[in-house]
Amino acid sequence: MTEEYIRNLFNSNKEILFLPVEVSSGNEVYPTLFAIWQEYIKFLKHTSELSDCVSEAEFQINHLKTCIESYFSGNFYAADEAMKAILIRIAQHKNSSIITNLFDLYIDNESHQWFRARQGASTANFKRKDMKHVPYSLREKVGNTRYSISGIPCLYLGNSIYVCYRETEKQNEEQIWVSRYAPRQSVRVLNLSTTAFELVNATTFIKGLTNNSFSEDKYRSIIKEYFSNWILQSACSVHVKREEEVPFKEEYIIPQRLMCMIKMFGIDGIMYFTVRDRGSFVSHLSWISKNIAIPAFDSIKGTYSEKIDQMFTMSEPLCFEDFKNGCAGTLKECFPPNPNWARTNEPVIINGKCTRYICTDYYRAEIELMQPEYWEENDREIIQKIFPLEHKHK
């Protein structure tokens, strides 16, 4: 198999393979998924190079259907057992890129490029603690989201400020505050974030295949693992185009049951691509459209998750509006000495125009938050090693 072959495979089967799955109402979620899955099995059977992925795909379909049927009939134990069976099957595979260490997924320092955004005007004056997950004392404010269950705080991080903005509910790019997060230690994730664009550009974007380390056997293994687990990824990648907010969302059932199971497999969080930009699955945008959801399962007391605090170090927040207007920030002109080309050259749509990411205020803010002034003193040395900067001299 070659990258060109996989490109043609995706382009010839867009109606089946392109994600997210989009529907116009909640009651269409599972009838649509079940119909797509049926066509997906036909697609695998008629594609000789992928025919040995059929059994894994059918296994996931059967158990996901059991999960849904059990959930709606009130048998939550059976629903969770079905989800657990899928994870057991995935965990049995060695050298998996589905259950993996975050550091093993990215080239250069991209595994450290994580951000947290919160909606708020410049007068909100957020501090570092305000950029953590919802404190345990405010559990009552934690509602249902794709990977969050009512009452369970969850830390959501995006791998660019752009995707953080896209994920904010009110979609006001100026009225957000952003902090940079950097892992202190390994973060074990269930990786549902791989996109078609990455697979057809694997020698550039997939660690282990870059820097002249590509081999056909290794690439074939990654492709087969992806298509074997595409069913689970699709079940967690449904976008319902609702005009109003509703208290229950069918598309969240599987992601939430999945989140309930990860702790017993030693998984810290779930990594996924945003469903708010359909183009992120098939374009350069996929590189900066990833999120991680990390549940705060480790305590029922205190204020914040000690495990998450140990897992990451974080910067002081920056008001994006003030920074954009030149009213906040260090005012230093600096840049990374070896910027990642994939990040800097991503085309994003700003005010209706296609713009390279390096030319956006989002990217400028990302660089700004590399500055040592935003970090606690005992973290500054390690941050400067992770994010070395060169300054422009006037």
Image (cartoon, rainbow, N blue to C red):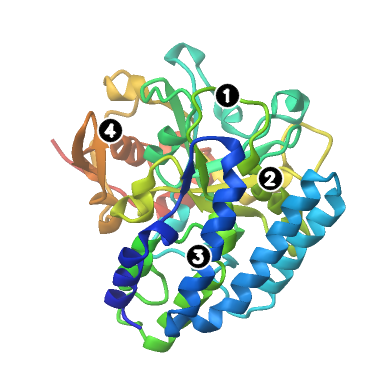
Question: For the residues carrying marks 4 and 2, which lies nearer the camera in this image?
Answer: 2
Mark pair 3, 2: CA separation? 22 Å
Q: Residue at x 43, y 84 (%)?
A: 49
Graded by Cα atoms within 10 Å as few (under 14), some (14 to 19) or many (20 or more), the crowding at tag 1 reads few
- Check disc 4 and give the amino acid type: Asp
- Check disc 1 and give the amino acid type: Glu
Q: Residue at x 76, y 24 (%)?
A: 140
Give me the disc on residue 212. none
Q: Quadrant of residue 66?
A: bottom right
Mark pair 2, 1: CA separation? 17 Å
Q: Quadrant of residue 250?
A: top right
Q: Secondary structure at mark 1?
A: loop
Q: Residue at x 57, y 74 (%)?
A: 96
- Of label 1 and label 4, which has the lower sequence position? 1
Measured as percent of width and height from the top left, residue 37 is found at 55, 62
Measured as percent of width and height from the top left, residue 9 is found at 34, 71
Mark pair 1, 4: CA separation? 30 Å
Mark pair 3, 4: CA separation? 43 Å
Residue situated in front as seen by the camera: 237 or 206: 237
- Of label 2 and label 1, which has the lower sequence position? 1
- Of label 4 and label 2, which has the lower sequence position? 2
Q: Which residue is mark 3?
A: 39
Q: Relative to 4, does residue 131 appear above or below in the rendering?
A: above
Q: Is residue 284 visible?
A: yes
- Check disc 2 and give the amino acid type: Ile
- Of label 1 and label 3, which has the lower sequence position? 3
Q: Which residue is mark 2?
A: 253
Q: Which residue is mark 1?
A: 245
- Of label 3 and label 2, which has the lower sequence position? 3
Graded by Cα atoms within 10 Å as few (under 14), some (14 to 19) or many (20 or more), the crowding at tag 2 reads many
Q: Secondary structure at mark 2?
A: helix
